[in-house]
Amino acid sequence: MKIGFIGLGNMGAPMAKNLGEAGHDVTGFDTAGVTVEGVSPAATMEAAVEGQEVIVTMLPNGAIVRTVHEAIVAAADPETLVIDCSTIDVESARAVHDLAGEKGLMSLDAPVSGGTGGAAAGTLTFMVGGSDAAFAKGRPLFDIMGAKAVHCGPAGAGQAAKICNNMILGISMIGVCEAFHLADRLGLDRQAMFDVASTSSGSCWSLNTYCPAPGVGPESPADRDYRPGFAAELMLKDLDLSQTAAEKNGAATELGRHARDIYERFVGAGGRGKDFSAILERLGAG
Ligand code: NAD
């Protein structure tokens, strides 16, 4: 397939590389002038969009996605499928679907889980919103960039799934860190806490796979001085998205709000640039 890829950052670059390595003809564009092995660089966004069968975007936020998708829709061929993999608010996701629909283009919101490691390894999980036909067309590309793609429903359903998942993640990471902190104060060995909780009803991804305590459990950002991984400010961004959505839609998400506030304080007090699991240090348990 002829694919245009816009946004070649920490996530977009390895995703575009994997599409190229799988034999697709990929042209990339990034305002920072990034180039990626196996991806033809385009001098302008229009040059990356014109004549492509699929356009993939992987961008920082909803405002940028809206602006970029206006330009994409203006330059794209009528048969093009437009896939946005960024994590953005549900309203912006629906707005860019509408924009594509007005030009008769197919579109998907397809945010991902799995981080930069998953992007490099091609093992991301895609959460996808859009029509059955659009999902069927995008699926072979999800199978290259990821290990799993779930069609969650119509336009915006992928972003809805993403912010609900990450609200669970933010809350559960804080819960696991508080448990280690309490264990420390009780004189309980961290390894013993891990051995029990990771095989008991306290088990969860934040503990079992991404343990925030250095030297305990499988290797995680805690073992490399909390270098991300998944940066605390990105977790704050996602908790902002879930909280804004909860307030707009009348959902009771008290712990989600609390988690948002805790990450806001953490990012403001030196946590920016650290992995989101470094919240354990903030509790004074390090
Ligand atoms: P990043 O900042 O590394 O990359 C974004 C890229 O977009 C940058 O290279 C930037 O130059 C480019 N860009 C910005 N405006 C542009 C424009 N108008 N036209 C073209 N390029 C433009 O961010 P990232 O870590 O790759 O994350 C991208 C998205 O994926 C975000 O929405 C993020 O929330 C989401 N996400 C990130 C992770 C992660 O672990 N990093 C995990 C899951 C989802």
Image (cartoon, rainbow, N blue to C red):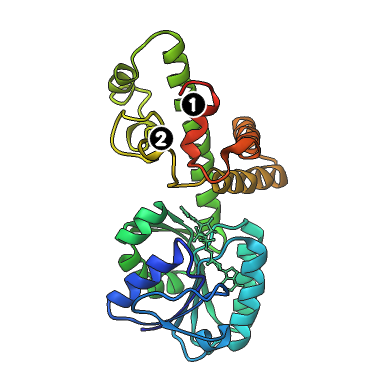
Q: Quadrant of residue 246?
A: top right
| In the rendered image, the vertical position of residue 258 relative to residue 15, given as above or below | above
The image shows residue 130 at horizontal and vertical percentages of 51, 66
Residue that sits furthest to the top in the current view: 186
Q: Is residue 140 visible?
A: no
Where residue 265 sits in the image (x, y, percent)? 65, 34
Q: Residue at x 61, y 68 (%)?
A: 65
Residue wearing tag 1:
175
Q: Is residue 244 above or below residue 260?
A: below
Precedes in sequence: disc 1 or disc 2? 1
Q: Where is residue 116, by image quadrant?
A: bottom left
Where residue 225 appears, as percent x and y from the top left, is 42, 38
- Residue 230: horizontal and vertical position, in percent? 47, 47
- Identify which residue, 140 or 262, lies in the foreground: 262
Nearest the eye: 182 or 35: 35
Under circle 2, the secondary element is: helix
User: As drawn, is 146 to the left or to the right of 65?
Assistant: left
Tell me: is circle 2 under 8 Å from ligand 1. Answer: no
Q: Which mark is residue 206?
A: 2
Q: Residues within 10 Å of mark 1 (few under 14, many from 20)?
A: some
Q: How many callouts does the rendering have?
A: 2
The quadrant of the picture occupied by the C terminus is top left
Instruction: Give the residue displayed 51% in from the left and 42% down from the top.
Output: 274
Under mark 1, the amino acid is: Gly
Query: Residue visible at 62% across and 75% down?
Result: 68
SS type, badge 1: helix
Q: Is residue 238 above or below residue 183?
A: below
Q: Amino acid at mark 2?
A: Ser
User: Residue 70, labelled with which disc?
Assistant: none
What quarter of the picture does the N terminus occupy? bottom left
Instruction: For the residues labelled 1 and 2, say whether their Cβ atoms are less than 8 Å apart.
Output: yes
